[in-house]
């Protein structure tokens, strides 16, 4: 094999590898700087989960319930004795 041809092939291969490395480094630096599109992980932006609100008693409702339960207990005491 001719030495000049071998050197020319090696130089061509070196240039090809240099371009490949530059392309890889260019895409890596663009991804780090936010230039490339990143795939988002997790819930889509703008969607929130609403906490389930548990039904609570109002003071007036608590009073009505208290009166009703006292009445019920009084009837049970009356029927058992």
Image (cartoon, rainbow, N blue to C red):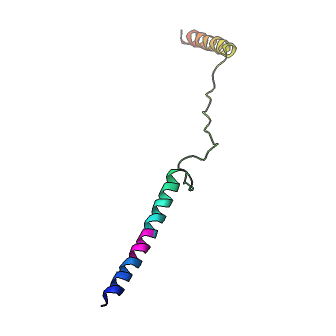
For the point 61% across and 14% down, the residue is 69
Position of 1 relative to 66 (above/below): below
Q: Position of residue 4 (x, y in %)?
A: 34, 86
Residue 14 sits inside the magenta stretch? yes
Position of 69 relative to 38 (above/below): above
Give left or right: position of 72 versus 32. Answer: right
Residue 55, image quadrant: top right
Give left or right: position of 62 versus 24. Answer: right
* The C terminus: image quadrant: top right
For the point 52% across and 55% down, the residue is 30
For the point 49% across and 55% down, the residue is 29
* The N terminus: image quadrant: bottom left
Q: Nearer the viewer, residue 47 or 52?
A: 47
Residue 2, image quadrant: bottom left
Q: Nearer the viewer, residue 21 or 58?
A: 21
Residue 66, image quadrant: top right
Residue 43 sits inside the magenta stretch? no
Position of 40 relative to 73 (above/below): below
Q: Position of residue 22 (x, y in %)?
A: 46, 64
Q: Residue furthest bottom?
A: 1
Q: Residue furthest front?
A: 4
Give left or right: position of 44 versus 13. Answer: right
Q: Position of residue 27 (x, y in %)?
A: 50, 60
Position of 29 relative to 24 (above/below): above
In the image, which residues are magenta? Answer: 13-18
Q: Nearer the viewer, residue 73 or 67?
A: 67
Q: Residue furthest right?
A: 60
For the point 61% across and 10% down, the residue is 70
Give left or right: position of 1 versus 72. Answer: left
The dominant secondary structure in magenta is: helix
């Amino acid at each position: 094999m001719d030495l000049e041809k071998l050197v020319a092939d090696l130089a061509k291969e070196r240039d090809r590898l240099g371009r490949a490395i530059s392309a890889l480094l260019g895409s890596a630096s663009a991804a780090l700087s936010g230039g490339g599109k990143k795939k988002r992980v997790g819930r889509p932006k703008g969607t929130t989960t609403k906490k389930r609100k548990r039904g609570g008693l109002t003071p007036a409702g608590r009073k009505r319930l208290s009166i009703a339960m006292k009445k019920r207990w009084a009837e049970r005491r009356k029927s058992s004795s």
